[in-house]
Image (tube, rainbow, N blue to C red):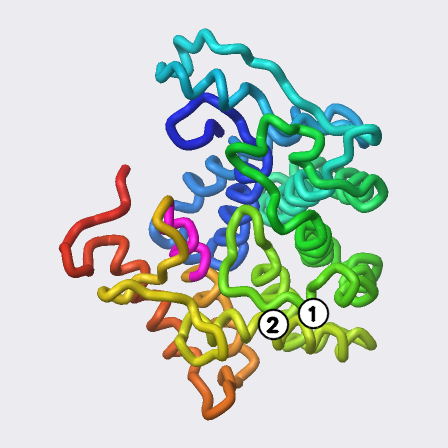
């Protein structure tokens, strides 16, 4: 996938997009099938994972960017007519990038779950690459924009790589049910910030709220084993995020006068959609666990959490003070 309106392939946000598309199918594939959209959604995921597989030619080599934003942005043209340089930038043991490799591992692990039933051989291939990339990311640690410096102006990794390592481990556990990845989450929850970072955003750079949500599901599903005390720390931070969106926390997200979650002036909808997704899945997890979301002075039901998520999606689709749709295409 090209980025935005240009012809650069930026690996980190692209891989995150594939992870999130896969997660949506994992959670709501049945509803997509009922509306006739599951095949389209899976095609969209496979378009991304086919590229990720090609970008990973050997266990410790991964190509994280194709094209250069500085030169590309001087010339607006169709991809079919592009004349800008197509230099490819790779990571390897001498140029480590744990955040990029970790996110790409998460994307392929999540996608392997999507294709497990419909294309088992492809799913196994994705999972093998995901496990290799995770091993590479964990062994050769580093921040990707320190190696692919041309990405710094466009997709600088502010949060570092610790969140992506946990994020990848969570998806690999979900894909394999392996004790190794469960233990990784337990052993590294404190050191890598999974139990420490209380977030009010979730997006292509900062994955903590996402991994905390996944681990909370493991805990509520009774699969935490002896890691339960650590996983409770993850869940507390997941619920901090939910409460902040609901306006029930100690540090709440800002909202516009019309009620839209507001993170920043530029491309704010990415944070609205990602937060809405986490709110939706967490409301489902709470419903399955038959519990409410507790905060300092009360509690919120799963249906109330879902109502907030729905209000954000409705706002994007036109239920807002300007009666304007923000979704195009």
Residue highlighted by disc 1: 195
Return the disc, 2 or 1, that comes first in the chain's sequence. Answer: 1
Outermost bottom residue: 297
Q: Regarding mark 1 in the picture, which secondary structure is present there?
A: loop
Q: Is residue 121 visible?
A: no
Crowd rating for badge 1 (residues with CA inside 10 Å; few <14, some 14–19, many 20+): many
Tell me if residue 293 comes above or below residue 55 in the rendering.
below
The crowding category of the residue bearing disc 2, from other C-alpha atoms within 10 Å (few below 14, some 14 to 19, many at least 20), is many
Report the residue marked by disc 2.
237
> Picture quarter containing residue 93?
top right
Placement of 216 over or under 8, stated as above or below: below
Identify the image quadrant of residue 99.
top right
Q: Which residue is drawn at 24% across and 53% down?
A: 317
Residue at 48%, 72% (x, y): give it.
242
Q: Tell me if 131 is positioned left or right of 320 in this view.
A: right
* Residue 134 screen position, x and y as percent: 76, 44
Describe the element under mark 2 as helix, strand or loop: helix
Q: Give the range drawn in magenta.
A: 267-275
Residue 146 visible in the displayed image: yes
Kindly identify the residue that appears in the image at 44 percent across and 42 percent down.
41
CB under 8 Å between callouts 2 and 1? yes
Task: Based on the picture, tell me whether residue 270 belongs to the magenta stretch.
Answer: yes
Q: Main secondary structure of the magenta part?
A: helix
Q: Which residue is drawn at 50% across and 51% down?
A: 25
């Amino acid at each position: 996938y090209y980025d935005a309106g240009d012809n650069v392939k930026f690996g980190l946000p692209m891989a995150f997009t594939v992870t999130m598309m896969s997660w949506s199918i994992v959670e709501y594939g049945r509803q997509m099938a009922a509306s006739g959209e599951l095949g389209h959604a899976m095609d969209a995921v496979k378009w991304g994972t086919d590229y990720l597989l090609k970008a990973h030619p050997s266990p410790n080599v991964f190509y994280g960017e194709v094209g250069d934003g500085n030169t590309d942005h001087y010339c607006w043209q169709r991809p079919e007519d592009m004349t800008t340089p197509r230099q490819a930038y790779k990571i390897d043991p001498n140029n480590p990038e744990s955040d990029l490799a970790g996110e790409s591992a998460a994307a392929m692990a999540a996608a392997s779950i999507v294709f497990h039933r419909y294309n088992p051989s492809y799913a196994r291939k994705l999972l093998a690459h995901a496990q290799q990339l995770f091993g590479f990311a964990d062994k050769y640690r580093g921040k990707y924009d320190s190696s692919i410096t041309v990405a710094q102006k466009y997709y600088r990794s502010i949060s570092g790589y610790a969140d992506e390592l946990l994020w990848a481990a969570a998806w690999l556990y979900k894909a394999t049910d392996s004790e190794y990845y469960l233990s990784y989450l337990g052993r590294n929850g404190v050191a890598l910030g999974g139990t420490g970072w209380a977030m009010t955003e979730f997006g292509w750079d900062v994955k903590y709220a996402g991994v905390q949500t996944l681990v909370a599901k493991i805990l509520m599903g009774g699969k935490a084993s002896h890691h339960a005390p650590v996983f409770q720390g993850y869940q507390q931070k997941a619920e901090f995020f939910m409460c902040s969106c609901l306006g029930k926390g100690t540090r709440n997200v800002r909202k516009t006068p019309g009620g839209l979650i507001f993170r920043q002036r530029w491309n704010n909808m990415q944070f609205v959609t990602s937060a809405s997704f986490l709110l939706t899945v967490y409301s489902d997890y709470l419903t399955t666990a038959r519990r409410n979301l507790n905060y300092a002075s009360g509690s919120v039901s799963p249906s109330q959490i879902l109502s907030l998520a729905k209000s954000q999606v409705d706002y994007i689709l036109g239920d807002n003070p300007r009666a304007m749709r923000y979704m195009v295409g």
